[in-house]
């Protein structure tokens, strides 16, 4: 089955033939004709060819879409996508500027909207969260002066002072000894992921609307199955909020 699918992928421009040039970089890939294939084909490609099929490539399928992202904000302030919005140029309140300027550089840039695992802000937040949880033993989400002092005593081991090694051990305690798990232990296989896509359990084979596009009309039964509700019946009457949860 894999062999048949791999034979079809070159037809969509998703697998380069032998001797082809290296794949385009992330920036140029956004406008590459090869990425105009259906999302379902891109997802199948990711499952079959990605080193880690649970994460996939950095393709449009695995990228979050938002109508109010960096491009929208930059355009609203008259700056280029590679530009910066200084404090004086920002049109919103100061409190909002401080929240958007995540690296406290004094300007909002594309990097402030980067929530990938490689983003400096995300890495810093991970370390801070570890530190906070170790100190906030009662789990109330706040650190009092007493909780800070108690945490210092625990981490210093009663020495009255603390070294960088003491802090490292406190933040990253040794895990219990156990057999080393395999690289993909507990993760679904490529076959399971592929069958999930084809059966509709891991998303639809049809691409959904982009942010800002009109929602497709649909009719669904109520939880008690006594009546149906059609989205278009609310048009012009009242706002509608659709919430799609992940319950897997």
Image (cartoon, grey):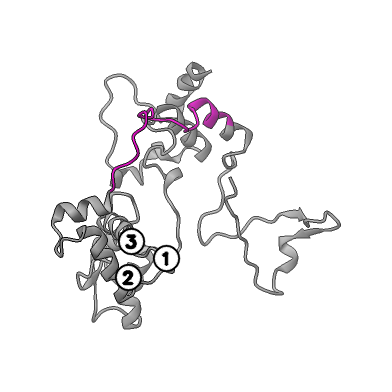
- Quarter of the picture holding the C terminus: top right
Residue 124 horizontal side relative to residue 239, left or right: left
- Out of 153 and 123, give the one closest to the viewer: 153
- Out of 61 and 55, give the one closest to the viewer: 55
Earlier in the chain: of badge 3 and badge 1, it is 3
What label sits on residue 138 in the rendered view?
1
Disc 2, SS: helix
In the image, residue 203 lies at what x, y percent? 57, 42
Earlier in the chain: of badge 2 and badge 3, it is 3
Residue occupying the point 57% across, 35% down: 197
Mark pair 2, 3: CA separation: 33 Å
Badge 3 is on which residue?
Answer: 113
What label sits on residue 147 in the rendered view?
2
Magenta region, residue range: 173-195
Rate crowding at label 2 as few (under 14), some (14 to 19) or many (20 or more) other CA atoms within 10 Å. some
In the image, residue 144 lies at what x, y percent? 33, 75
Disc 3, SS: helix
The reply to whether the C-beta atoms of the residues labelled 2 and 1 are less than 8 Å apart is: yes
In the image as oriented, which residue stretches furthest toward the right?
226
């Amino acid at each position: 089955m894999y062999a048949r699918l791999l034979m079809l992928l070159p037809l969509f421009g998703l697998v380069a033939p032998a001797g082809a040039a290296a794949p385009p970089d992330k920036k140029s890939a956004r406008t590459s004709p090869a990425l105009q294939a259906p999302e379902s084909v891109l997802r199948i490609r990711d499952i079959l060819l990605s080193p880690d099929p649970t994460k996939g490539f950095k393709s449009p399928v695995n990228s979050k879409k938002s109508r109010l992202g960096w491009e929208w904000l930059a355009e609203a302030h008259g700056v280029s996508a590679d530009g910066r919005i200084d404090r004086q140029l920002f049109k919103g309140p100061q409190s909002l500027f401080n929240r958007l300027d995540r690296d406290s550089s004094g300007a909002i840039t594309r990097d402030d909207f980067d929530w990938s695992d490689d983003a400096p802000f995300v890495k810093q937040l991970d370390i801070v969260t570890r530190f906070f949880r170790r100190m906030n033993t009662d789990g109330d989400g706040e650190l009092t002066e007493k909780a800070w002092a108690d945490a210092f005593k625990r981490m210093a081991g009663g020495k009255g002072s603390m070294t960088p090694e003491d802090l490292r051990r406190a933040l990253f305690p040794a895990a219990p000894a156990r057999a080393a798990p395999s690289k993909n232990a507990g993760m679904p296989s490529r076959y399971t992921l592929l069958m999930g896509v084809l059966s509709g359990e891991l998303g639809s084979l049809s691409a959904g609307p982009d942010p800002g596009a009109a929602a497709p009309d649909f009719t669904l039964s109520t939880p008690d199955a006594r009546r149906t509700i059609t989205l278009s019946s609310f048009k012009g009457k009242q706002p509608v909020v659709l919430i799609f949860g992940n319950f897997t």
